[in-house]
Amino acid sequence: MASQDWFDKDFYKVLGVSKDISDADLKKAYRKLARKYHPDSNQGDAAAEAKFKEISEAYSVLSDKGQREEYDQIRAMGSGSARFQAPGSGGAGGFEDVFSRFGQSRGGSYQQADFDDLFSMFGQQSGGFGSGRFGQSTGGFRGYGGPQRGADVTARTTLDFQTAVKGETISLAGEDGKPFKVKIPAGVSDGQKIRLRGRGRPSPDGGEPGDIVVQVTVRPHPVFTRDGLNLRVTVPVTFTEAALGATIEVPTLGGDPVKLRVAPGTPSGRVLRVKGRGVPSSKGTGDLLAEVQVAVPAHLDDKAKEALERFHEVEPKENPRAELMAKARE
């Protein structure tokens, strides 16, 4: 920031605080205003964006002890106080009082070293404004903090389940309406954010640009669900398949079915694992977890009922709920 800006801008007024505010209260005031005017909460509102930049600029100066002291000194010198009164206007000192701070005598002459002292007050050498607190080589005059980083831009996209699992490159429209490419990594999950470095809004004063932050929503699949890097699927089997054992087919995501062996006496809830048929990622590939669900027939014809009744007469006389009841009484 240029010194003239510091003369002209009242940072205390921008933040709505008094000059004797504490650091803690200053931070609270800044955070309250930053939340109100942040570009992510006011997309497309140029006035809010300009206000946010003004608030950030003010806080970057006042939150730094050294910069705040210099700012207060500069504002005091430019406030019309007696130190800047011209000779004969009622003040005894006028400009002489200002330069007397740097070793000037009232005789009207001053040494080169005094100018060096004056410029060193602003972090400069007497040769110019090439470095120090009022200037950065990257452009813009913002003080110790350097140029302001550009704002991030939030984008949203909804993916189908298989695209999220397998990964893909998609196109999205930017704020200017122009399309840009986003590489969706394999295994991206619902709610995950993908950051595109340097693709956001430009810096207002020569700093690095912000990022594009893509927030991902994944549509649910009618068959599969995610369990970390594993995929889960519920597989119905008949009573006889579960009781006698069977070889069944199980679907995979985007591939051919696989065959699994159901052991005799398999109960509902047992999980059969298919290695390497889950979600791929940089950390490896998960598994397919097939949970067995014994299907009870809703309708039985007379022959089926007779057969089932004969089975009931010869089935083992054990109560499957005996252990449950015993534990409940403990």
Image (spheres, helix red, strand yellow):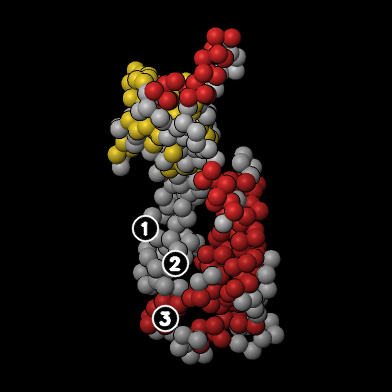
Amino acid at dot 2:
Tyr
Badge 2 element: loop
Q: Which residue is mark 1?
A: 137
Q: Is residue 51 visible?
A: no
Q: Is residue 74 above or below residue 213?
A: below
**Of marks 1 and 2, which one's residue comes earlier in the chain?**
1
| On-image quarter of the C terminus | bottom right
Q: Which residue is mark 2?
A: 144
**Of marks 1 and 3, which one's residue comes earlier in the chain?**
3
Between 153 and 103, the residue placed more toward the observer is 153
Dot 1 surroundings within 10 Å: few (below 14), some, or many (20 or more)? few
Q: CA distance from mark 1 to mark 3?
A: 23 Å
Between 102 and 234, the residue placed more toward the observer is 234
Q: Position of residue 126 (x, y in %)?
A: 38, 73
Q: CA distance from mark 3 to mark 2?
A: 19 Å
Q: Which residue is mark 3?
A: 117
Contact? badges 1 and 2 (CB < 8 Å):
no
Residue occupying the point 47% across, 27% down: 315
Q: Is residue 327 visible?
A: yes
Residue occupying the point 52% across, 90% down: 106
